[in-house]
Image (cartoon, rainbow, N blue to C red):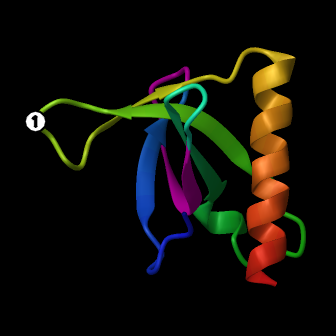
Amino acid sequence: MALEEQERIIIPDENGEEHLFEVLFTFDVDETNHSYIAVVPAEQKDEEEVEVFAFRYEEKEGDDDDLALYQIETDEEWNMVEETLNTLTEEQE
């Protein structure tokens, strides 16, 4: 599902430094019961070519604003996410 208004999230890197990202899309995959989020670095948003990051996520119990993010590790999962992102991007154009 495409988000109506632009949401921002902070994601810490492996060194604990926090980075601001703008959420492009969130979507669910019924076959796997997983949810995914695609984000771009906020400082790169207006550049012509931006790097898109995608994660599998779960909402933490009892906290509507906190997400647990997980790296996408398999090629199969990456291909599925990439295909969905391409479809959602085409629909917005």
Left or right of 88 in this view: 35: left
Quarter location, residue 90? bottom right
| Residue 11 image position (x, y, % from top left) | 47, 40
Give yes or no for residue 21 being in the magenta stretch. Answer: yes
Quarter of the picture containing the C terminus is bottom right
| Residue 48 image position (x, y, % from top left) | 89, 75
Residue found at the very far top of the displayed protein = 74
Quarter location, residue 36? top right
Residue at (77% x, 76% y) in the render: 91
Residue at (62% x, 22% y) in the render: 71
Left or right of 15 in this view: 43: right
- The residue where tag 1 is placed is 62
Neighbourhood count class around disc 1 (C-alpha, 10 Å): few under 14, some 14–19, many 20 upward: few
Magenta range is 14-28
Dominant secondary structure of the residues highlighted in magenta in the image: strand
Residue found at the very far bottom of the displayed protein = 93
Residue at (24% x, 31% y) in the render: 60
| Residue 22 image position (x, y, % from top left) | 54, 63
| Residue 16 image position (x, y, % from top left) | 45, 26
